[in-house]
Image (cartoon, rainbow, N blue to C red):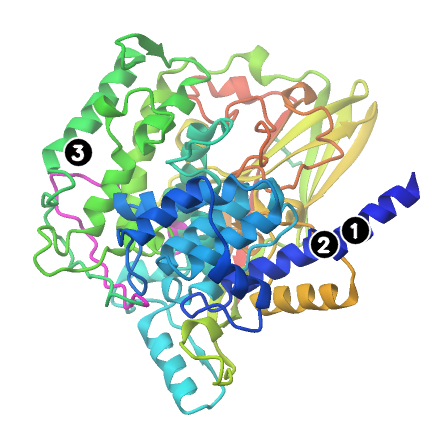
Amino acid sequence: MKWILLAAAVLAVISGTDVAHKQQAINRLLYKVTEPIRSKFTDLKEASKSFTPTGAGAKLDKEHKDHRLLQQKHWFSLFNPRQREEALMLVDALLESTDFDHFKNTAAYFRERMNEGEFVYALYVAVTHSDLCDGVILPPLYEVTPHMFTNSEVIQKAYTAKMTQTPAKFEMEFTGSQKNPEQRVAYFGEDIGMNSHHVHWHMDFPFWWHGEKIDRKGELFFWAHHQLTARFDAERLSNYLPVVDELYWSRPIKEGFAPHTTYRYGGEFPSRPDNKIFEAVEGVARIRDMKEMESRIRDAISHGYFTSHSGDPIYIDNERGIDILGDVIESSTYSPNVEYYGALHNYAHIMLGRQADPKGKFNMPPGVMEHFETATRDPSFFRLHKYMDNIFKLHKDKLTPYTHEELAYDNAHITDVKIDGELTTYFEDFEIDLTHAIDDTEEIDDVAVSTYVHRLNHKPFAYKIKVKADHEDTATVRIFLCPKHDYNGIELHLDEYRWGCIEMDKFWTHLSAGSQEITRKGSESSVTIPDRVPFSDLIKEADDAVAAGSDLDHKNIRACGHPARMLLPKGKSEGMEFNLFVAITSGDDAAHPDLATNEHGSTHGYCGIHGQVYPDKRPMGFPLDRKVTDEREFHIDNINVSTVKVFHKK
Ligand SMILES: *[C@@H]1O[C@H](CO)[C@@H](O)[C@H](O)[C@H]1NC(C)=O
Ligand SMILES: [Cu+2]
């Protein structure tokens, strides 16, 4: 038996279907995407000339031959319907592949013919979803397309370094000035790890998705964005700012935004001054269209049902309702009646993105709000998401509060909750390689150019939870960090703070009869991922493995997940108080039988388990997602709320 496996492994290495070869091919396909495939990558270069695309690829090739495709060296936005259509043709062509060679050759062929932005998007999505690419790590997007994650100042400096052939490393500041109070939380909205999480979330769960059904996609849309909103609010409170107010269509957009960012092709990202009055965007929507979409959705929430195409009611005052509401609001292809309920989220992004040039008079490229990479930099992103979050809350608040039976787990008695170590945040510098930000040719050598950004991190810590169990069992542990006081320093009740709770972790564990201590490290959190592997490391590792005839065994391949270093919101020098909420419920909540020993790729809290059902059978956010009318229901042995302090050190 063993020699058969060995023979299979040897065969895989020789034929190039092992992870090392795949990783190498993906690296090379993304290497300097705005330039032709390097001639030293002979197989890809050859495929780009002589491959004959089939199926969806043939259809896309015909569009190319008919000169219908978007030119190269032009901006790309997923919210542009035609550009999206082109990118999705490539996604289909790639996902149709039945072997990796076909996948690789299709990609190589279209890399030389399609718009680079469309190509990168399609390749990232296809690698994420294709079984043929299992084990492949996607290079950090901030290194492949640095223009979307940095600013014009940094890119200009990079060009100077290249032109003068002088290696350089320079600082990247956050956008704006300290005269703007919003600047205090720019480290959150502009964090490259968080931006990457956001853009990857939308690649794992695309609104246009027409492939195999993705479990609880609409609910994940709600939960991932709700968590971004809650986290941003927590950061604001630590920075002496009130929580975000929602967006109003009929009031001025309070905060302006000057992105200081330039497209690689297509000029500068448009700016928006403070207090801009919303205008209709030609060819997209009028303000009254937006209000209409909103009021139809609010109507459905009040009625407790949506109306399908055929006029049938789809009841939502139940556990499943949130999933449907998420599908409707985004909207995704799962929306039961997109003609009637519209696409509130997607249209709102475009409306906000275009306010600088609503009539298209100045031929401005799309705004930061029209790209998932850049959207969170603009303070209006969080206003918009607060607005939608409040609509979700309206629905959740209609549901019957959890009963004692639903909350209790008589087997577990929490006797103590402690933090091992100090909850301490700090800022650090992080270096980003800018090699891919600047043009060159095969003949010109690369110059080492990088920028360092400031980013939030925290010291290692662990939760220590003492539990007494009546009998042996598997249990579900949920940990939330919740605001304790509002902006004015007034202590909040459970029903006031629950919606602002940050999901820190959720895991399954084995309880033995009697007393025990559960230790869980912050770094094990199921909502976060570790730092991304730099592109240059991925290249070196794959090239070395291929040269040595060995394979790669990648762990942590998911790109969706909040950055581990941002698990804790920023503290205060004197300490910022939070409520640490711990709930232990029965292991029956697990949707997979082995969760206590197998985390299924971790990072499932905000990103689910790839290709499988969401691990928790309960609604996302349980038990804090519903109204609490009687706080005493939560005074039970399996739930504990304690106060913790998060410090911030210079
Ligand atoms: C939770 O645990 C803390 C610390 O162990 C304890 O002081 C507190 O009384 C507990 N609270 C509840 C509601 O059980
Ligand atoms: Cu989003």
Kindly report the secondary structure that dominates the magenta region of the rendered protein. loop
Dot 3 crowding, Cα within 10 Å, few <14, some 14–19, many 20+? some
| SS at circle 1 | helix
Which of the 4 image quarters holds residue 422?
A: bottom right
Residue 538 locus on image (x, y percent): 62, 64
Residue at x-position 22% and y-position 41%: 247
Residue at x-position 26% and y-position 43%: 81
Residues at discs 2 and 1 in contact (Cβ within 8 Å)? yes
Give above or below for 44 relative to 507: below
Which of the 4 image quarters holds residue 550?
A: bottom right
* Marker count (numbered): 3
The amino acid type of the residue labelled 3 equals Met
Dot 1 crowding, Cα within 10 Å, few <14, some 14–19, many 20+? few
Q: Is residue 353 visible?
A: yes
The residue tagged 1 is: 11
The residue range painted magenta reads 236-264
Numbered circle sitting on residue 290: 3
The amino acid type of the residue labelled 1 equals Leu
Residue at x-position 74% and y-position 68%: 547
Which of the two labelled residues, at mark 3 and mark 2, occupies the earlier sequence position?
2
Residue 101 locus on image (x, y percent): 60, 51
Residues at discs 3 and 2 in contact (Cβ within 8 Å)? no
Alpha carbon separation for disc pair 3 and 2 = 54 Å
Q: Is residue 242 visible?
A: no
Q: Nearer the viewer, mark 3 or mark 2?
A: 2
Residue 83 locus on image (x, y percent): 30, 49
456 or 131, nearer to the observer: 131
163 or 367, nearer to the observer: 163
Looking at the rendering, the quadrant in which ligand 1 lies is: top right
The residue tagged 2 is: 15
Residues at discs 3 and 1 in contact (Cβ within 8 Å)? no
